[in-house]
Image (cartoon, rainbow, N blue to C red):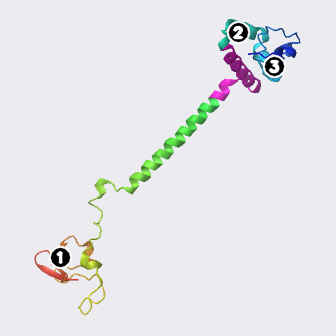
């Protein structure tokens, strides 16, 4: 734990207390001479005699952790005399809660955006059906027929209001290459 060079110069605790650092000094392994502020803070908050009692009561394998905890709490108390470590813990807990709320809001936004891309099932019957494409509609217009160069024509015959054929729900498409359309009860329209 303590090197032989640490006995040549007093440990930070003995130097601070202005006493001779003996070979069995309980502070020497945990308060090296290079870290005088560490012991200064611990002494200021807890007192040297309390730290000595604590270290003597602990098994040797737990002493280093105890000193590190004391040093951390002492430094926190020097920075914030009222709250110490509790202030730092409270700050971090508030930060975690704030970040959790932001994460929940972001997840809610993701769910809302994902659901908005999928139309709700109750709206399917209200939306117009998608345009129906027939293989004859995708072919180039025929030359010489009465159709000219247009792909769509208004239906002729009974019930032909001002709508395009692809959106007509009462018409059924046939695979007839002449482009005839069966309309309701036997009326015909041409493409």
Extreme-bottom residue of the structure:
144
- Residue position marked by numbered label 1 in the rendering: 175
What residue is rendered at 77% in x and 8% in y? 49
The answer to whether 141 appears left or right of 51 in the picture is left
Neighbour class for label 3 at 10 Å: few (<14), some, many (≥20)? many
Task: Give the labeled residue for mark 3.
Answer: 40
Counting labels gives 3
Magenta region, mostly helix, strand or loop?
helix
From mark 1 to mark 3, how far is it between C-alphas?
A: 95 Å
Q: Earlier in the sequence, mark 1 or mark 3?
A: 3
Q: Which residues are magenta?
A: 62-89
Would residue 184 be seen by someone viewing this image from the given angle? yes
| C-alpha gap between disc 1 and disc 2 | 95 Å
Disc 1 secondary structure class: loop
Residue 142 image position (x, y, % from top left): 26, 88
Whether the magenta-drawn stretch holds residue 115 is answered as no
69 in magenta: yes
Q: How busy is the neighbourhood of tag 2: few (under 14 within 10 Å), some, or many (20 plus)? A: few
Q: Which residue is mark 2?
A: 54
Q: Sequence order check: which comes first, mark 1 or mark 2?
A: 2
- Residue 163 in the image: state x and y as whole percent: 27, 77
Mark 2 residue element: helix
Q: Quadrant of residue 155?
A: bottom left
What separation in Å lies between label 2 and label 3 (alpha carbons)? 17 Å
């Amino acid at each position: 734990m303590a090197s032989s060079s640490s006995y040549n110069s007093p440990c930070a605790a003995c130097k601070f207390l202005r006493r001779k650092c003996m070979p069995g000094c309980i502070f020497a392994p945990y308060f090296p001479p290079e870290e005088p502020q560490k012991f200064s803070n611990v002494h200021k908050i807890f007192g040297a005699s309390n730290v000595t009692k604590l270290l003597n009561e602990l098994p040797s394998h737990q002493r280093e952790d105890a000193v590190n905890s004391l040093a951390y709490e002492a430094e926190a108390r020097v920075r914030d005399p009222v709250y110490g470590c509790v202030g730092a813990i409270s700050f971090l807990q508030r930060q975690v809660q704030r970040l959790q709320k932001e994460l929940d809001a972001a997840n809610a936004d993701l769910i809302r955006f994902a659901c908005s891309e999928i139309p709700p099932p109750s709206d399917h019957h209200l939306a117009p059906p998608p345009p129906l494409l027939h293989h004859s509609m995708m072919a180039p217009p025929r030359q010489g027929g009465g159709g000219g160069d247009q792909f769509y024509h208004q239906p002729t015959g009974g019930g032909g209001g001002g709508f395009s054929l692809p959106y007509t729900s009462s018409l059924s498409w046939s695979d007839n290459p002449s482009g005839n359309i069966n309309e309701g009860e036997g009326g015909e329209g041409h493409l």
